[in-house]
Image (cartoon, helix red, strand yellow):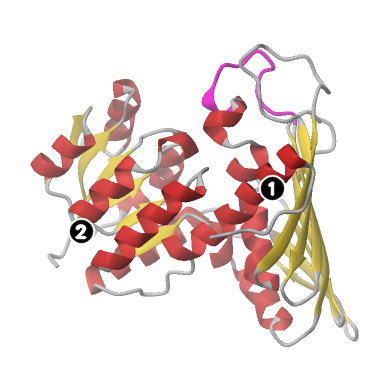
Amino acid sequence: MPPKVRLAFIGCGGVVAGHLDAGLKDFPDVEFVGWCDVNEGAAEARQEQAGGRGSVYADPAKMISQAQPDALFIMVPPFAHGAPEALAVEHKLPFFIEKPVASNMSVARKAAAGIKRVGLITSVGYMTRYRHSVQRVKELVDGQTPVLMHGGWIGGGPDPDSDSWWVQKDKSGGQFLEQTTHTTDLARYLFGEVTAVYAVPIRERRKHGRFFTAEDASMVQLTFANGAAANLYSSCSTPVGGGIRLLLWTTEMQAEFTGWDHAVTIRLSDGEPITVPGEEDIFAVEDRVFIDSVKAGRSEGILSTYEDGMRTAAIACAANESMAIGKPVKPEA
């Protein structure tokens, strides 16, 4: 591998801006070679943000052919997955992919099979796993008996008249799949695999335009293989008192994560509470691990591969099925 990783992007929305500003645009060992988006203006904005480096494309296959990247960042909405991953597999390009990896498990399984067949390095954007606060709690949980979890994402959501893909259930998969996926993944990371999902949708809390087909809120019950349980909530209809939280208990500990940066307060059965602050530029941490892995040709500390991220997506897909049929569903990755 040359000293610099030639990096191209499929999807150039706001989340890409976050990665660039967090530090990726200043990595000395990254050469930006391509920006591709159905919205040419978004691709041009990211090109400008990166100092004009790289070319703008409308067709990802043409970008790969002409720009000759060493790796891809796949940063598309849930409904747009499938074709970008197929291109990565076809050209044997390692890729970083934003969460969730898909809104449909058949799409995810097809991608996973291709990734396994050609042996690609992959990393999923579950950046919270890399936080010091999460790693400290995981060290403690791994030596204890998990009991309960409670938390999620609460907010006011987009404009009720919005026609963005985020508010359209068939495109975003709903808030639990698209946004609360970070908390779902954290639950899995700390308490282990999930064997049953029961979800209750909450609708018609606010007036919306005709494009708004996602739930206003949901409550999702998870049963873990080890017998523990979690209750995860999501709301895009409650602008007062919102935020991101996760509270968990083991037989020996309570841990409370708060805010986007997931600062944590840990209370043990003896001793004073332990506080671990969160990191603001966590995108740079996960991006650094991915670039180092591409250069090494092996994982250099990747905490969520595509296969692992697929298991988190399976929980959300099971929740959506449960909302539809009113019964518990077993996640099937």
Mark 2 lies on residue: 92
Which residue is found at the position 21% from the left and 40% from the top?
Answer: 34
Residue 297 image-quadrant placement:
bottom left
Left or right? Give the position of 66 relative to 144: left
Assess whether residue 160 is covered by the magenta stretch: yes
Q: Position of residue 2 (x, y in %)?
A: 12, 65
Main secondary structure along the magenta-highlighted residues: loop
Badge 1: residue crowd in 10 Å (few <14, some 14–19, many ≥20) = many
Q: Are marks 1 and 2 in contact (CB under 8 Å)?
A: no
Q: Which residue is at the far left? A: 66
List x then y, in percent, for residue 128: 58, 60
Disc on the earlier residue, 1 or 2: 2
In front: 40, or 168?
A: 168
Residue occupying the point 22% across, 57% down: 93
Res 99 visible: no
* Residue 319 tag number: 1
When the figure is inspected, residue 319 is found, relative to residue 295, above or below; the finding is above
- Using the rendered view, name the quadrant where residue 132 is placed: bottom right
Residue type marked 1: Ala
Residue type pointed to by label 2: Lys
| Relative side of 18 to 92, left or right | right
The magenta-colored residue range is 156-166
Residue name at image x 40 percent, y 41 percent? 81
> Residue 321, position in %: x, y?
67, 44
